[in-house]
Image (cartoon, rainbow, N blue to C red):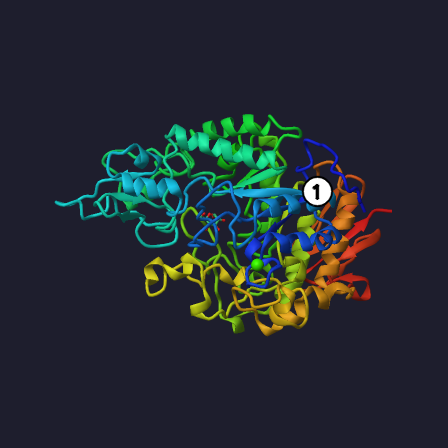
Amino acid sequence: MTTESVLAPSSTWWRQATVYQIYPRSFADANADGIGDLRGITSRVPYLRHLGVDAVWLSPFYPSALADGGYDVADYRNVDPRIGTLAEFDEMITALHGAGIRVIVDIVPNHSSDQHPWFQEALAAGRGSAARERYIFRDGRGEHGELPPADWTSVFGGPAWERVEDGQWYLHSFAPEQPDFNWDSREVRDDFLRTLRFWSDRGVDGFRIDVAHMLVKDLPDPLPTQAELEAMDAASGTHPLYDRDEVHDVYAEWRTVFDSYDPPRTAVAEAWVATPERRARYAAPTSLGQAFNFDLLTADFDAAQFRAVVTDNLAQSAVSGSSSTWVLSNHDSVRHATRYGLPPLHGRTEVKQGTEWILAGAPADAVDLDLGLRRARAATLFLLALPGSAYLYQGEELGLFEVGDLPAEARQDPAYLRSVGQPEWSFDGLGRDGCRVPLPWTRTGSSFGFGDDGAHLPQPAWFADLSVEAEEDDPASTLTLYREALRLRRELQTAEELAWDDAPASVLSFTRPGGWRTVTNFGDAPVPLPAGEVLLASGPLPDGELPGATTVWVRAR
Ligand code: GLC
Ligand code: CA
């Protein structure tokens, strides 16, 4: 195991890194107010180090009214007082760096909170003011401007235009509390450059860019209708709202900031764009440098689908020059241990145009948890063997399931709240709170060791058996599997290459340089074990065979 406590300066550390996503409000609570905080993260650095991750990515911890779990930022260069202080941020980063773990923070540039001083100023300054130019204000339609400028729907459901007191309307692609910035404004651009420098100066190693494809817009007059928008080619680079070619001019400016540091700061784009080719543009070295590939997250546990995803994405990374990224879970989707216990995704889950969030809130009794977890462990070992960087989401190392039965009154997600009673806006699900429930650290105790008091989302009784304490010393636990896998991955990881081996239709087998071979049985019936020394398996290997829903790593002799 690499145990260096000082980070070796390297401009390529991210290419095959394992990055662990922390959702700060739900990770660890150090001051017993039910909300996770920075001191909580600092207290768990030994855990992260033992897990063996190369970096953490922190979802937003900035001051926020929490209309969207912190993705509504009121001050980009500060810490929410409920989560900590800048001094505690510095302590956290020192502790993480001391443990050899790099730090990525989330930047939310498409929109601010409606509590941001600039938006408040825009409201007060009135129509035609310079302050309104930082956002996207328009007059309404109808005799008195009483109709929204267009009939557009927001990503979270409901209208995308909201009226303000003096009668004008502003655009919010997400919740009304998240007004979209006007990226034609030089002030907006300069302010984000300042934010990137602010966190880079504090030692942050990289940035995750929220909805990176949406910033730059070109709203024609008259505005198109929703139906017209949907009929437009989203891969053209000229769609009024999404993935416009000019967004890369913004990132070219950011690149000069990233590259002014040593080592250069990195970035990864969250870009839900129409094609892998469009995504590769965000991963280019002149743009953000890396982009999330959510294709495994949206695939069924299926050999042909997995193989196609891997082949496509490795081809794209050859084009962009970046390394590929792999994701099975994050704070926006149903945890993969639950997803894989549901009937196959394709044809069942509503896939929202442009967003493809998986919010399949199936009833608990429709989930085969045992199968879901076996497949999740197999998929994770498959993913961790791929060339490129692996993004893990807090709690998946415990094999946590989605908490599907949160009471309605406990739910916080605007994607859920805005769709209640509005089936036509519904995401066909329960929203994203079920994957954001605070982590169980101990078997017992109030909030299972998350803190000394409650948790801001209620934890189910079954968290006890999936707690860190319950799994820590169990050789068969998911936590032990992740620790072993990450330790071996560091040792085995070589060039960003793989070669597919011959295998039956329901099996995928590939070999990395150095003879590291990964075989996943996506089917039900056992298949013969490959030759070689077994390094690790996602489940038991009875009778010298590889059972269904199992992955094995072997080293060629
Ligand atoms: C991204 C985030 C999601 C958030 C949305 C709006 O998709 O991952 O959590 O709600 O952007 O900021
Ligand atoms: Ca707290």
Q: Which residue extends farthest left?
A: 143
- Which quadrant holds residue 459? bottom right
Q: How many marks?
A: 1
Report the amino acid beneath label 1: His
Q: Nearer the viewer, residue 260 or 480?
A: 260
Reply above or below: 41 against 125. Answer: below
Instruction: Where is residue 495? Give x, y as percent.
Output: 73, 36
Q: Nearer the viewer, residue 526 or 47?
A: 47
Q: Nearer the viewer, residue 66 or 174?
A: 66
Q: Is residue 491 left or right of residue 500?
A: right
Q: Could one spot residue 523 in this view of the protein?
A: no
Reply above or below: 352 against 126. Answer: below
Q: Is residue 35 left or right of residue 390?
A: left
The residue under the point 40% across, 44% down is: 116
The residue under the point 77% across, 49% down is: 487
Instruction: Where is residue 273? Give x, y as percent.
Output: 46, 41
SS type, badge 1? helix
User: Label 1 crowding class (10 Å Cα cut-off): few <14, some 14-19, many 20+?
Assistant: many
Instruction: Where is residue 375? Give x, y as percent.
Output: 64, 61
Q: Which residue is mark 1?
A: 97
The residue under the point 77% across, 54% down is: 484
- Which quadrant holds residue 135? top left
Instruction: Where is residue 379? Give x, y as percent.
Output: 65, 55
Q: Is residue 137 left or right of residue 105?
A: left
Reply above or below: 528 against 96. Answer: below
Mark 1 CB within 8 Å of ligand 2: no
Q: Could one spot residue 324 in this view of the protein?
A: yes
Q: Which residue extends farthest right?
A: 557
